[in-house]
Amino acid sequence: MTRLVVLAVFAMAAAGQSAVRIVFAGDVMLDNGPGHVVAHGGDPFADVAAALKDGDFTVANLECAIVSAGEMAYKNYVFRGPKSALPLLHKYFSAVSLANNHTLDYGRKG
C-alpha cells in the first residue's frame, strides 16, 4: 500500500501538480447495516461523498471480505460485504487495504 501511495504522489508531481491531497477514510465495513443499504441499491457513502472526492488519492481500510463463497471462520466477529459494493468502492476510493483481522473471514478461497 505504501508503495502505491508513493508512486501515485510521484506520478502526480511529475504531471505538474504542485500539491497532492491524500484522504484517509479509516475503517470501512460493508456488512450488516451498510451492506443492507448496498444490497438494496443505496449508497452508504452519500453523506460523506464530498469529503471522499476532495482528495487526489483516497485510501480506506476495508474491514470485511467482499465474497459470496467460502467457509466462515470460527471467531466472534466475521464480516463480508456484497459483491454489489465493488462499484461503490471503485467510485470513492483509489485503494483499500485488506491487511487486517477480517481478510480471511471466509477463508483463502473466499
Image (tube, rainbow, N blue to C red):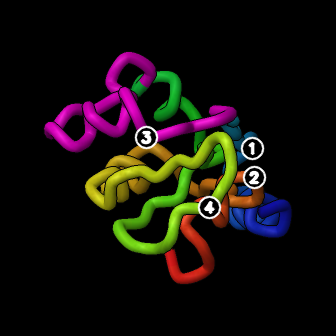
The span shown in magenta is 25-48
Rendered residue at 41%/56% (across/down):
90
- Real-space Cα separation, disc 3 to disc 2, in angstroms: 15 Å
Amino acid, disc 1? Ser
**Residue identifier under label 2:** 101
Where is the N terminus found, in terms of image quarters? bottom right
Q: Nearer the viewer, mark 1 or mark 3?
A: 3
Amino acid carrying label 3: it is Asp
Q: Mark 1 vs mark 4: which is more N-terminal?
A: 1
Q: Which residue is mark 1?
A: 18
Q: Which mark is residue 73?
A: 4
Q: Position of residue 68 (x, y in %)?
A: 35, 67
Q: Amino acid at mark 2?
A: Asn
User: For mark 3, what is the residue?
Assistant: 31
Q: Kindly state the secondary structure of the residue where label 3 is placed.
A: loop
Q: Is residue 14 visible?
A: no
Residue 109, compared with residue 52, is above or below; it is: below
Query: Image point 34% across, 51% down: which residue?
Result: 85
In terms of sequence position, does the residue under pointer 1 or pointer 3 come before the other? 1
